[in-house]
Amino acid sequence: MLRRRVRRCICSRQITKLRTDRYSVEGMPVRLLFAMALAARLALACKCGGQPSPMCQQASTLTASDVVFVGKVVEVWPTFEALQREYRSLSKVQLRERLLSRWRGVLSVDEVAKVRAGGDAMDDVAVMQRVRFEVSEHLAGPRVQEVYTDVSSCGFLFEKSQTYLVDARRVGARYQTGACTRTAAIADWRAIEDSKSLRAWKAGRSLVPRIYGWFDDEESRSGVTLRLRESRDDERATRPDSAGFFSFDNLTPGEYRLVIEDARGRGETSIDLTRWHCYEASPWFSKRWYVPGVPVAIPIR
């Protein structure tokens, strides 16, 4: 079962009132054809190729191409509403010229060439946004105050005046973030855990192995017990707190078995902490308990 964060997208019902264009293909306005193709692209679910690793695992591998900071949003530009208006009013040629002008110096030479050629690359650039921050804490990488994202399902929906942990990667002259990164609202449990790990790493402290996670369904976590076994004689037990969070801290490198059970059933996962600093679990129940997480563990049936 996959649970996806819901984001706004420019969907078909939002473009039904597009005004007609004097040029058409088989009776359909070119502008409408373009907008419909773009809407279909934005409505697709983002494919990340797996969950991004938590910062307790990433910290030691971050480079100058990565940036992580805590900041409050002061500007999101263009706004979602402005992008909608462009799709309603501009032809494909007009939109292409506006994009090239808007993002001059931001797009790479290759991206500029692809936008001029039209197609998928132009669609990607057409939904880009620049987000500026009041940065309160730099945790990794160069000191930047703006990143780029988009309004597609692979982007991230930032809200003005809200504070986030921002995880971005360098793409040409800009830093890009989105759904396939660790970017999250600062109150999100993932952002809390990532901030702790990065602060320890930045201070030069060793990251002690640990296993932690969160139950996002309040009903499913009621009555749940978690047991962590390294050997037959070494077992720890805990329960999720009122917010659904749990952790096994101060572990040693080794191979562990995480067991989750309640009155409905149980599930197990084998976790190798000889190679990783941590394991971040996201348990869910469907006839039995499943314990997916990152880095990838080995489910036991």
Image: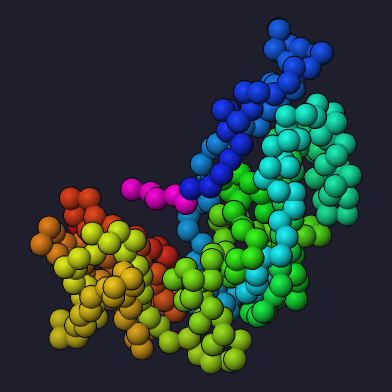
Query: Taking 58 as reference, is 261 left or right?
Result: left
Residue range of the region highlighted in magenta in the rendering: 1-5
Look at 61% across and 51% down and name the residue there: 155
Q: Is residue 132 above or below residue 247?
A: above
Look at 15% across and 81% down and name the residue there: 232
Q: Is residue 165 above or below residue 46?
A: below
Q: Is residue 127 above or below residue 68?
A: above
Look at 51% across and 81% down and name the residue there: 197
Residue 211 sits inside the magenta stretch: no
Front residue of this view, candidates 204 and 194: 194
Report whether residue 28 is seen. Answer: yes
Query: Taking 167 as reference, is 245 left or right?
Result: left
Front residue of this view, candidates 222 and 104: 222
The image position of residue 299, as x and y in percent, is 28, 60
The image position of residue 201, as x and y in percent, is 56, 85
Query: Taking 218 as reference, is 70 left or right?
Result: right
Look at 65% across and 72% down and name the residue there: 71
Extreme residue in the left direction:
263
Quadrant where the C terminus lies?
A: bottom left
Front residue of this view, candidates 279 and 241: 241
Figure label count: 0
Examine the image and state in which quarter residue 89 appears: top right
The image position of residue 246, as x and y in percent, is 31, 75
Q: Is residue 211 above or below residue 217?
A: below
Would you say the magenta stretch is mainly helix, strand or loop? loop
The image position of residue 254, as x and y in percent, is 33, 81
Examine the image and state in which quarter residue 264 appears: bottom left
Report whether residue 113 is seen. Answer: no
